[in-house]
């Protein structure tokens, strides 16, 4: 029972166990390879699909980071690789209808059945797009991560833009996940900071989950909470070394992001990783895209949103269920943690306008149907008062 807590991360693939939460959990990813030179294992992991066509997807940045190497490894091993490269120049690749549609177009060989496997080389946008397409086409996919920038490498949801809205679609777990620390430690510093911001966001996500359990009777798996908290503890202990690209600090960051994904995969919901802080991030991202602007990196937004949500817990301390508030550190502690890891701290740091920021505090809880501390504030008639107070603290 709860055996997964005692396993090294690379041994968690194909794990199933009866959990103390009363459910049988199954982590069905076939292979996880995280560490130095992990990309070398790509041909071995992909070996069961060697007889068909492999579609390899990257953008101009991820091709330079790892795509060229991944393609060479597969070609040298005798795989039939078809390439799809999204060249967006300096623009951010947005995982929207055009990207998903382009991947679908490239799947076919001489016959549509020829493609046996999708290999994505990248992080958030590439991963989510390939995951979604592979799920609907009943194909396995392998993700070769290029940056420790988000926690979706081992999750089974696919957050995509559709008609201007950020929607998390059902998908499936990857067949294999490769996180080469030699590649990821050389990612742009803002992507490392984004990954750290996403990890910091788990602080308020766990508190939000506790609130939903106590107010709405939601299900919670304490094994998953423990898995996430252990990963956070290791990552935060080395946070101040992330701006220096310390190898151990980067490894712990990758592990924290991956283990959070494992927790989501085990219970098939994103509660261990995503709460009100993610709702604010999605609200801001949708606004930027609607105005034709490049969105800010997801994890940077999540990090900035985390002390904001901590302020909600502080303002509602007098009416929160017993024990919930204690799960969330003060917003000052969270801001100090973000700064130590080289991540932006305030909404001003990422260029959010006062108007957008306040609007997100009022309407952010409607972004997805998930109970959060913001909805709790609305139910108790205190949402606008708290929103005004927090906005004034940051902008006046």
Image (tube, rainbow, N blue to C red):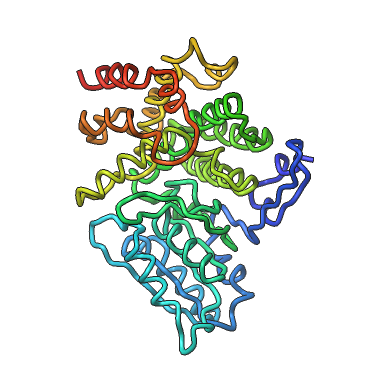
Q: Residue at x 34, y 18 (%)?
A: 386
Q: Position of residue 96 (x, y in %)?
A: 34, 59
Judging depth in this view, the residue of 60 and 75 nearest the camera is: 60
Q: Is residue 245 visible?
A: no
Q: Is residue 241 left or right of residue 384?
A: right
Residue furthest bottom in the image: 110
Residue 336 vertical placement versus 49 (above, below): above
Q: Residue at x 49, y 10 (%)?
A: 318
Judging depth in this view, the residue of 121 and 365 nearest the camera is: 365
Q: Quadrant of the N terminus?
A: top right
Q: Is residue 87 visible?
A: yes
Q: Quadrant of the C terminus?
A: top left
Residue 89 vertical placement versus 84 (above, below): above
Q: Position of residue 274 (x, y in %)?
A: 49, 38
Q: State the count of labels.
A: 0
To which quarter of the image does residue 259 belong? top right
Q: Position of residue 228 (x, y in %)?
A: 59, 36
Q: Residue at x 32, y 16 (%)?
A: 385
Q: Position of residue 16 (x, y in %)?
A: 74, 51
Q: Residue at x 54, y 73 (%)?
A: 117
Q: Is residue 375 left or right of residue 265?
A: left
């Amino acid at each position: 029972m709860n055996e997964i807590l005692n396993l090294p991360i690379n041994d968690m693939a194909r794990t199933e166990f009866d959990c103390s939460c009363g459910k049988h959990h199954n982590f069905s990813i076939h292979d996880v390879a995280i560490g130095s030179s992990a990309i070398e294992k790509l041909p071995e992991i992909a070996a069961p699909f060697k007889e068909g066509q492999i579609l390899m997807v990257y953008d101009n940045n991820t091709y330079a980071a790892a795509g060229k190497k991944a393609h060479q490894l597969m070609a040298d091993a005798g795989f039939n690789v078809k390439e799809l490269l999204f060249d967006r120049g300096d623009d951010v690749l947005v995982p929207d209808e055009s990207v998903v549609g382009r991947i679908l177009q490239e799947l076919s060989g001489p016959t549509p059945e020829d493609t046996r496997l999708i290999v994505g080389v990248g992080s958030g946008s590439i991963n989510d797009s390939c995951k979604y397409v592979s799920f609907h086409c009943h194909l396995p996919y392998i993700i070769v991560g290029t940056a420790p920038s988000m926690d979706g490498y081992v999750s089974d949801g696919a957050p995509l833009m559709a008609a201007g809205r950020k929607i998390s679609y059902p998908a499936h777990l990857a067949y294999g996940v490769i996180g080469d620390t030699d590649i990821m430690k050389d990612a742009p510093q803002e992507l490392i900071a984004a990954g750290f911001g996403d990890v910091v966001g788990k602080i308020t996500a766990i508190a939000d989950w506790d609130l939903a359990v106590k107010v709405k009777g939601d299900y919670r798996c304490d094994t998953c909470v423990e898995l996430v908290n252990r990963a956070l503890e290791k990552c935060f202990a080395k946070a101040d070394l992330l701006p220096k690209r310390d190898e151990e600090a980067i490894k712990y960051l990758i592990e924290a992001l991956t283990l959070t994904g494992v927790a989501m995969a085990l219970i098939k919901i994103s509660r261990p990783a995503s709460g009100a802080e993610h709702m604010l991030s999605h609200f801001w991202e949708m606004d930027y895209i609607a105005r034709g602007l490049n969105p800010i990196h997801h994890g940077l937004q999540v990090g900035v949103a985390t002390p904001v949500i901590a302020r909600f817990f502080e303002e509602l301390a007098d009416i929160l269920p017993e024990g919930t508030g204690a799960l969330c550190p003060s917003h000052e502690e969270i801001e100090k943690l973000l700064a130590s890891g080289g991540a932006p701290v305030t909404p001003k740091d990422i260029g959010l306008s006062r108007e957008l920021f306040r609007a997100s505090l009022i309407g952010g809880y409607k972004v997805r149907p998930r109970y959060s501390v913001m909805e709790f504030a609305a139910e108790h008639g205190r949402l606008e008062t708290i929103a005004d107070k927090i906005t004034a603290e940051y902008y006046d």
